[in-house]
Image: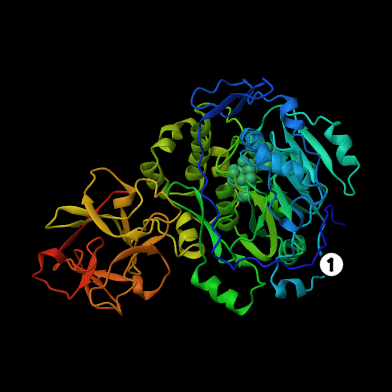
């Protein structure tokens, strides 16, 4: 028995863009707070307080009126088959005001009916794939939420854990409303704001299904999303399986297909990121595009896990607050303690990606304090020597590391006899760009110019992958990620966000350029360094790293190696990271 509603609308197939040209927007966490008087004279405060959060103070100060009298009753045809919803221009002022409440277009969401249809966007092979339905385990779908939009929440599917929302469901109590739906929906309430991690634990404890399936409160599932997740777990209960997370546009609620060629990992700040699949997994996809593939980490919101395995493996870290870090904590724990994390490409679930969070971060230090205390816990429990590297790179986390106590989680790791982080990097994510004990980590200095190699994009990259020109800048004294590179045993010169020193036109141009590009594990990105001559040699061409050519004055170049050429002399300056 599945406690869920699976939409079986298969026709018609809409033309979606191919994989890979859709990017998941970068998440930024603005700390500002919005305040305004709306046209009916109601004082509205939304957003989270920064820094000076006062524990116990409840925000946002939203009135029921604003939340429930949006003027539209749902239009049965709005957003049908995942199409975008347009708000007439005469109402755009109200649309913009309501936007702040959830950091998505609430007016558009409220127009879409609770049972909106979505296209079946699966690849043909996925639709044809047969599952032994009688052998699939039951599952409970757990959705935790705090001040989420009712229209979006109810299109998601079904053990709802209310993390002390201040928003009221005006028409009738939520419990009475869901009782009328054609599926079993239970509502659990946390008396106080407990954060998504402990709210999920509340749901897990009450779940009746064999498998726990977690979703965010602004998701919409497509045809056949559940079978690929459950069948992997039926075969092996130590698998933790995620769907492909498609994009529900935050402005129009259009359903947009996401890429199937990415997996999840994380950057030097322990922020979750999507990167190109490793070569091994790409090969696997060539053989069978319906096959689940491994991922070093999961995004966190959408996944299925066997309930017994979930508890056996230590469920979640109960001392993590509000938001953040629990996805990496679980990914490390599952991988390092004998399980696996994977993505089932035939399972598609849409999610509204917001650019910032609409809710408060109660606790010391606001968003930053909460998030970095969670991440400090992850680092201290799972990263071994790399935790020192993490705290060196992340001053925010370093400031709070003494506030956290992780003894119980270290004991758990010990009890489960887990592998160490070195094992994780070597075996689960060999394509990683973290420093290693047998490789170089530090600055690459051009002797004659007394400047250092720098990747584009500034301190935080600016985009998910800061690619572009490879240039030189005055060397910064302290550890500065854009000027800090890993040179590993495989010959890749790489840095944060999985970008590598590359020469895309080495075999065609007379003056090949050297650029910073997404790491791809190809030989074109491999280099050697000779300590005596100080030449950095591009293996594939046999040419050496040099200053920009006249043809392309904005980026470094490759030139015929010349031990007497001052412009080809580089020094590798080691940075301590242990
Ligand atoms: C991502 C995950 C999210 C979670 C988070 C890290 C996806 C698509 N989403 O961020 O599930 O793993 O990373 O922690 O992978 N909520 C509460 N109480 C709170 C705060 C949030 O119940 O105090 C609920 C919230 O209403 C929502 C869910 O937790 O249903 C996830 O929050 P989010 O949507 O703000 O997280 P997201 O998608 O930015
Ligand atoms: Mn979410």
Residue at point 81% right, 39% down?
73
User: Residue 233's spot in the image, x, y percent?
Assistant: 72, 62
Res 19 quadrant in image? bottom right
User: Residue 286's spot in the image, x, y percent?
Assistant: 58, 78
Q: Number of marks in the image?
A: 1
**525 with respect to 67 (left or right):** left
**489 with respect to 104 (left or right):** left
Looking at the image, is 110 positioned above or below residue 517?
above
What residue is disc 1 on? 133
**485 with respect to 9 (left or right):** left
Residue at point 19% right, 63% down?
547
Residue at point 57% right, 25% down?
35
Quarter of the render that holds ligand 1: top right
User: Residue 568's spot in the image, x, y percent?
Assistant: 16, 66
Q: Disc 1 on helix, strand or loop?
A: helix
User: Residue 526's spot in the image, x, y percent?
Assistant: 33, 71
């Amino acid at each position: 028995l599945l406690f869920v509603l699976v939409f079986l609308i298969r026709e018609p197939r809409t033309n979606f863009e191919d994989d890979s040209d859709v990017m998941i927007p970068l998440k930024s966490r603005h700390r500002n707070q919005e305040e305004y008087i709306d046209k009916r004279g109601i004082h509205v405060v939304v957003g989270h307080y920064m820094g000076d959060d006062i524990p116990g103070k409840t925000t946002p100060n939203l009135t029921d009126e604003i939340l429930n009298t949006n003027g539209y009753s749902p239009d049965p045809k709005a957003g049908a088959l995942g199409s975008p919803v347009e708000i007439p221009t005469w109402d755009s002022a109200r649309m913009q005001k309501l936007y702040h409440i959830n950091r998505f277009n609430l007016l558009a969401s409220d127009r879409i009916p609770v049972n909106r249809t979505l296209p079946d966007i699966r690849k043909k092979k996925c639709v044809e794939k047969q599952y032994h339905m009688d052998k699939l385990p039951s599952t409970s779908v757990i959705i935790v939420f705090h001040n989420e939009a009712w229209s979006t929440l109810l299109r998601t599917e079904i053990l709802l854990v209310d993390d002390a929302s201040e928003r009221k469901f005006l028409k009738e109590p939520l419990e009475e409303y869901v009782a009328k739906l054609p599926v079993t929906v239970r509502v659990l309430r946390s008396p106080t704001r407990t954060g998504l991690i402990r709210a999920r634990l509340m749901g897990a404890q009450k779940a009746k299904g064999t498998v726990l399936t977690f979703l965010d409160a602004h998701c919409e599932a497509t045809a056949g999303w559940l079978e690929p997740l459950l069948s992997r777990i039926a075969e092996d209960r130590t698998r933790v399986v995620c769907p492909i997370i498609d994009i529900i546009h935050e402005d129009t609620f259009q359903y947009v297909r996401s890429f199937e060629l990415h997996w999840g990992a994380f950057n030097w700040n322990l922020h979750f990121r999507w990167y190109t699949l490793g070569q091994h997994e790409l090969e696997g996809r060539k053989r069978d595009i319906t096959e689940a593939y491994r991922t070093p980490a999961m995004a966190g919101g959408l996944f299925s896990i066997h309930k017994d395995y979930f508890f056996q493996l230590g469920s979640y870290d109960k001392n993590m607050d509000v938001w953040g870090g629990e996805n990496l904590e679980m990914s490390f724990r599952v991988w390092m303690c004998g399980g696996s994390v994977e993505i089932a490409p035939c399972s598609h679930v849409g999610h509204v990606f917001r650019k910032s969070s609409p809710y408060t971060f109660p606790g010391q230090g606001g968003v930053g304090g909460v998030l970095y205390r969670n991440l400090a816990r992850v680092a201290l429990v799972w990263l071994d020597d790399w935790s020192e590297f993490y705290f060196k790179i992340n001053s925010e986390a370093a400031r709070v590391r003494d506030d956290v106590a992780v003894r119980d989680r270290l004991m758990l790791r010990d009890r489960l006899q887990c592998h160490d982080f070195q094992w994780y990097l070597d075996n689960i994510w060999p394509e990683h760009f973290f420093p290693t004990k047998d490789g170089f980590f530090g600055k690459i200095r051009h002797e004659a110019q007394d400047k250092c190699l720098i990747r584009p994009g500034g301190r935080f990259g600016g985009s998910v992958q800061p690619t572009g020109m490879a240039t030189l800048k005055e060397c910064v004294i302290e550890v500065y990620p854009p000027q800090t590179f890993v040179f590993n045993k495989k010959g890749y010169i790489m840095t944060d966000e999985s970008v590598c020193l590359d020469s895309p036109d080495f075999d065609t141009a007379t003056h090949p350029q050297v650029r910073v590009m997404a790491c791809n594990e190809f030989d074109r990105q491999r280099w050697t360094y000779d300590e005596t001559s100080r030449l950095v040699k591009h293996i594939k061409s046999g040419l050496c790293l040099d200053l920009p050519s006249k043809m392309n004055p904005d980026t470094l170049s490759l030139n015929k190696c010349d031990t007497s050429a001052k412009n080809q002399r580089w020094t590798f300056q080691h940075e301590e990271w242990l």
